Image: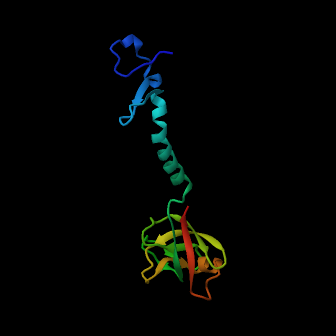
């Protein structure tokens, strides 16, 4: 087997770039070995692949906190909502975004659409319409601990 080195003076001895052999030497003890250049990239590609996979399988936007409900009316998006629509108010999510809201106490879930801004009460992350609150079984308590996951 021939040993190829990068920067060879003879271009005829230089293999294609994907198969190029590279000599690796440790400065401390002077040990050297030859390896293919593509194998050198494996340690660099693996962490990037792990990060990309973890981003792909994790929710885009998820948070947990307290939710309350409201009866409806004119919203910040310009819509007029009633108490029977499955809508919600959130501080930062864009209008029209669908989110899955899960009640931590009983595990019930509901899919709502963001149509308003808020909540403005301290300690709350989302305001739900009365219909959504009914689906989550939180009407009697007034508020509930929920998790919100963007769909």
Compared across the picture, whether 135 is left or right of 96 comes to right
Q: In the rendered image of this protein, does residue 87 appear above or below residue 12?
A: below
The part of the image, by quadrant, that contains residue 20 is: top left
Residue shown at 45% from the left, 75% from the top: 75
The part of the image, by quadrant, that contains residue 113 is: bottom right
Q: In the rendered image of this protein, does residue 42 appear above or below residue 6?
A: below
Compared across the picture, whether 109 is left or right of 124 comes to right
Q: Quadrant of the C terminus?
A: bottom right
The part of the image, by quadrant, that contains residue 118 is: bottom left
Please name whichever residue, 121 or 107, is drawn nearer the observer in this view of the structure.
Answer: 107
Q: Position of residue 86 (x, y in %)?
A: 58, 73
- Marks counted in the figure total 0
Q: In the rendered image of this protein, does residue 134 appear above or below residue 31?
A: below
Q: Position of residue 30 (x, y in %)?
A: 38, 31
Taking the view exactly as shown, the residue that stands out farthest to the bottom is 140
Q: Position of residue 51 (x, y in %)?
A: 49, 50
Please name whichever residue, 138 or 78, is drawn nearer the observer in this view of the structure.
Answer: 138
């Amino acid at each position: 087997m021939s040993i190829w080195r990068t920067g060879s003076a003879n271009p005829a001895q230089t293999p294609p770039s994907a198969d190029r052999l590279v000599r690796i030497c440790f400065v401390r003890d002077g040990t050297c070995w030859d390896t293919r250049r593509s194998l050198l990239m494996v340690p660099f590609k693996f962490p990037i692949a792990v990060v990309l996979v973890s981003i792909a399988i994790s929710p885009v936007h998820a948070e947990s906190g307290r939710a309350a409900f409201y009866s409806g009316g004119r919203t910040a998006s310009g819509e007029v909502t009633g108490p029977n629509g499955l809508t919600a108010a959130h501080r930062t999510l864009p209008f029209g975004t669908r989110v899955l809201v899960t009640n931590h106490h009983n595990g019930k879930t509901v899919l709502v659409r963001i149509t308003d801004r808020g909540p403005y009460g301290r300690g709350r992350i989302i305001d739900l319409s009365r219909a959504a609150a009914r689906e989550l079984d939180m009407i009697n308590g007034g508020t509930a601990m929920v998790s919100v996951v963007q769909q």
